[in-house]
Structures are given as structure tokens and as C-alpha cells.
Amino acid sequence: MATAYWKRDGEAAGNAPVDAPTTSFWKAGHAPTLIAAFLYFDLAFMVWVLLGPLAPEISKTLALTPAEKGLMVATPTLAGALLRVVNGLLVDRIGPKRSGAISQIIVIAGLFSAWLAGVNSFAGTLALGVILGFAGASFAIALPLASRWYPPEHQGKAMGLAGMGNSGTVLASLFAPMLAKMFGWNAVLGLACIPLSLVFVAYMVMAKDAPDAPAPRKLIDYFEPLRQADAWWLMGFYAVTFGGFVGLAASLPIYFTDQFGLTPIVAGYCTAGCVFAGSLVRPMGGALADRIGGVKALMVVYLVAALALSGVANATSLPGALGMFVMAMLALGTGNGAVFQLVPQRFQAEIGVMTGLVGMAGGIGGFYLASSLGLAKQMTGSFAPGFLIFAGLALAALASVALVKSRWRATWKTAARI
């Protein structure tokens, strides 16, 4: 059996010191758990953003305004952000495997009930969005489930591969509009329960909690990281990288149909291409951060993302917009991996709650972007102001990384990897 690695107060668990070399990546941890974490995360993300690809059809049926459409697709993101903290606490209290099982049952039962009863109002879409938030909160479970099995030098790759489950957003963009055209958008809610149930069975068979989990602590102790500035910096950085990724994933179907008059199916294909780019590079971002340091990777990420989002705001053609979106998603996906190369190095003993807190910040960033794009469209007739403001946030994040990098390198015990 592979040895589980995770640090307490800068020391490594097990018999190896923090900086000691270990075996190759695939022998260093527990591959079945890593695969189970990916599958769970992948299908959870698929349904988390499900309202985005269905939004053009839902908005026609319910006669939604641009602001209502923006709020509808943003609600699962906000619910997922808040629930990530709850899941982070559960991970440290009852373990990631049981926490994941509970969350999956809630999502499957919620979607099945929505399919049976039907969603017939704007308020109903918001209620469904809250249920889908449990799927988005899978982030705070899947990543610790995988991370606790791997030593520090493989954290970027392990977290990146598990986190590549955000590619589930591609599945939603590809198949949801097509199935909605064939069977109606409400039927898609029921059909989603089929792959979710299959993955639930695989998860229960393959996933295993790492040994030597930290002992349960008092509830107040879980929020101890918030007393440290580094926690807030990491949360802010992820609010931009992951917030940009998931906010765009949820909003692009609306953007493509409203801006260029595409059909929901074609808009789904365009969205899938953009999202696939961001999902594909997440593990590459973790590996890149392992090689050159998370700080250097993030500085490049924020600059490219700012330029790309500014380009989107000024795009006048579909090819131009697609090119800028792909560039933005490549940068943001890389940034997601880079941030989570840093988190376990600084907060390994609190990885469960920190994953929840950082993930919450990312979800809040996504809620802001998705809802602000809808508001911008309704108030100004254009999506451009929403994109430009988020580009400004990327530049602010770049300046912040430059501000803290010297202190991090001087004080972190893993300075060589930041």
C-alpha cells in the first residue's frame, strides 16, 4: 500500500522529511482514489453548470430578462461557494469519502425530484440552483481526498489531475443543449441522474481515505487559518482564476446566443471548446508550478488573462471572441493548478478547511462574473463592461502576487517550490 503524506506544522507525516526525494508520481500515492476523485469531481461539475447550457431554452420558456438569466446561472456558483466551507469542515470531521457520498446522494435526489415535479418559474430555477450548489461544493471533497495521499513534491500534479474534473463543464456544454432539443430541457435533469448514479457506485468502490488523518478539532479551530494573511491572499488569487473559469463556463452559452445569434447547440459547442482548453491545462498548471514555482506561474497567468478578457470586450466577430476566450481559459485553467500547488505547501495540516475556504472564494468570484455580465447586458446593452472590470481584477491580482512573493519566499519552508 502506498504511504499517505501530509505535513503538520511544516513537518512531513510518515518517515520521509519534507524535502526528501520520493518515488515516481504514480507509485507515490493511491491511484484508485485519485481516479475516483476525478470521476466524482468531473460529473459533479457537469451538473453544477447545467443551467448555463440550458439557459437559452429555459429563458424562452420562462421569459427571463438578461439580469434574471445571469442570476439563474450564477446561483449554483454562489451556493457551491458557500457549501464548500461546509464540505471542508465535513472532510476534516468525518473524512472525504463519506462527505463525498453524502453530497452525491443530495444532488442525485434533488435532480430526480426536479425532473418529476418540473421547474415552472424563475424561483424554481433558483431553488434548483441551490441544489446544484452541492455538486459545485464537491471541490472541497475531491481535492483533499486525492491530496492526502501524495507528498509535497507531487502536490501540484495530484491536485491538478483531481481538479481536472472541472472538464465536466465540457460535457454539460456538449450534450445538454442537444438532449434539450430532443427531449425538452426539463428531461435533461432526469437524464443527468444516470451517469451520476454510475459514478457514485464507482466512487464507493474505488475511493479510500488516506491513513493517519488529522484528529478532529473544535469547530472554531477550523477557522484558525483566517487569522493568517496568507489564507486571504490565496483566497483572493483563486477568486480570480477559478472565478473567471466557472463564471465564463456558466455564462458563455448566453453570451454566444445573445451576442452572435447562435443556436443553443452551436453555442454549446463553442462553450465546450473554450472550457475544454481551461480544463486541459489545470494539471499542466500544477506541474508547471512544481517546476518553476506557483508565484511565477500566477504572474504570467494574470497578465495573459487580463489581456484576453480585454480583447473579448472589444471583439466584433465570433472567431475573434472565440480566440480570446480560449486564451483566457488557458490562462485561468493554468492559474487554478498553480494556486493549488501553493495551498497544500502552506496549509497542509488544514488542507480540508483551506480547500473549502479557497474554493468558496473561487465560487464567489464566479458568481460575481456571471451575475455582473447579465447586469451589464441589461443596463448597457453590452457584455463588455463586465469583461473589462474582471480584466481589471486580474491586473489587481498580478500586483498582489508581486507584493507578497518576497515574504513568501523568505518565510515558507518550501520556498524552493514557490
Image (spheres, rainbow, N blue to C red):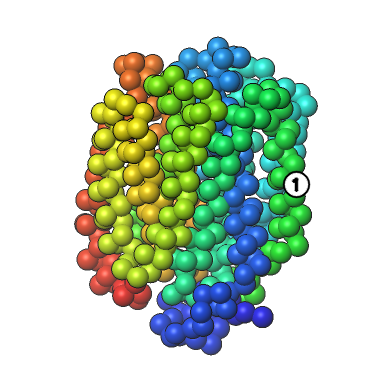
Q: In what quadrant of the picture does the C terminus appear?
A: bottom left
Quarter assignment of residue 310: top left
User: Which is more toward the observer, 405 or 34?
Assistant: 34
User: Which is more toward the observer, 263 or 295?
Assistant: 263
Q: Is residue 398 visible?
A: yes
* Residue placed furthest toward the top: 63
Q: Give the residue at x 69% y 64%.
A: 207
Quarter assignment of residue 416: bottom left
User: For mark 1, what is the residue?
Assistant: 197
Horizontal relation, residue 89 to residue 273: left or right: right
User: Which is more toward the observer, 69 or 171?
Assistant: 171
Numbered disc 1: secondary structure: helix
User: How many numbered dots are placed on residues in this image?
Assistant: 1
Q: In what quadrant of the picture does the N terminus appear?
A: bottom right
Residue type at numbered disc 1: Ser
Q: Position of residue 198 (x, y in %)?
A: 75, 50
Q: Give the residue at x 67% y 48%.
A: 103
Q: Position of residue 409 (x, y in %)?
A: 27, 70
Above or below residue 137? Residue 343 is below
